Image (cartoon, rainbow, N blue to C red):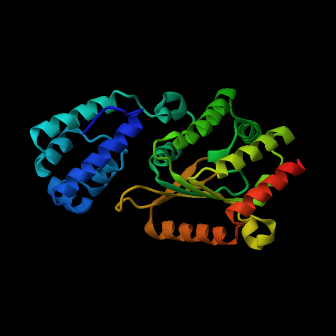
Amino acid sequence: MSTSGNANALTALREFGDELRRLRVGAGFATQASAAAKLKCSQNKISYVEAGKRWPDDDLLRRMFRVYVVDASAQADIRAAVRVGQSLGRPWWEATAYRDVFSSATMKLFALEEAAGTIRVHSGNYVPGLFQTRGYIEALVEFGLKAESAAHRRLFTDARLKRQKVFDRAHPPAVDAVVLEAALRVVVGGRDVMREQLGYLRSAARRPNVTLRVIPFSAGAAATMGAPFQVYGFPGAENRSIVIRETSRSDEVAEDIDEVERMSNQFADLAAVACGPDESLRLLEEIEDAL
């Protein structure tokens, strides 16, 4: 395993997880469950390591070497990869300042978002967070978090912008977003801020890994569905999707299979009544021109 070229710890973790997955399959363990039984650990622990969410502890790594029959040379390369990856530093959200502001559920959201391969998002009455400009975020924060300290508001804004760095990854997530027409017509932060926001949203919608669709007023009841939620999908056949619901105080993470299926179906229903991508871009231009 080569350890060169890793730009950051998250990339190193993902590459390391991919390598352990290859070793497992190569050793004849087609599923994580079968490997977990032999390794005498939980399947969840293997899933987290292979998904690039955490480094394995020394004991688990030794057992993997033995069960997967890894030769001494490969073991040395793998241990070197761990040392290099761990030396690259912690993810931005683990800084104490962010831990003082965000709930544990929201902190989990940050990690999941970084690891996601696909993101389906219904942003409700807002422009999708992954596409918000600084001016738009600051206008939302000025009103919605006015009871909080200036430091809290600044960290919230910075975190929202840092989350958008997922698009800078070597393999960025595929984002499928639906947004209400109402969210685009509300003038947040004044005309200049909103004009900049709409222009940025149009640019984002042209990215090859982004699908943006607007739910028009003419869609009827669907155009009133303002509660935002996201469905994250993860690389690998054994990594199930999860749902994130945004609330006024925190974020709720749901992993139950039935709930994920229900929210996935709801997203599909919303997308079905939305304008197509090209028509959505034309509507964005129309709303921006009206400003």
Q: Quick check: 110 left or right of 15? A: right
Task: Tell me if residue 214 can be seen.
Answer: no
Task: Tell me if residue 20 can be seen.
Answer: yes
Q: Considering depth in this image, is 261 or 206 the residue closer to the camera?
A: 206
Residue 235, image x, y percentages:
40, 55
Q: Quick check: 176 left or right of 183? A: left
Which residue is drawn at the image coordinates 52% and 43% (left, top)?
166
Residue 86, image x, y percentages:
33, 31
* Residue 272 position by quadrant: bottom right
- In which quadrant is the N terminus drawn? top left
Which residue is drawn at the image coordinates 27% and 52% (left, top)?
21
Which residue is drawn at the image coordinates 30% and 40% (left, top)?
55
Residue 82, image x, y percentages:
27, 34
Q: Considering depth in this image, is 105 or 233 the residue closer to the camera?
A: 233
Residue 130 in the image: above or below residue 28? above
Q: Quick check: 138 left or right of 211? A: right
Q: Quick check: 34 left or right of 94? A: left
Which residue is drawn at the image coordinates 29% and 33% (left, top)?
3
Looking at this view, name the residue that lies furthest to the right. Answer: 290
Residue 68, image x, y percentages:
14, 51
Q: Considering depth in this image, is 208 or 132 the residue closer to the camera?
A: 208
> So how many labels did they put on this image?
0
Residue 91 in the image: above or below residue 48? above
Residue 261 in the image: above or below residue 177? below
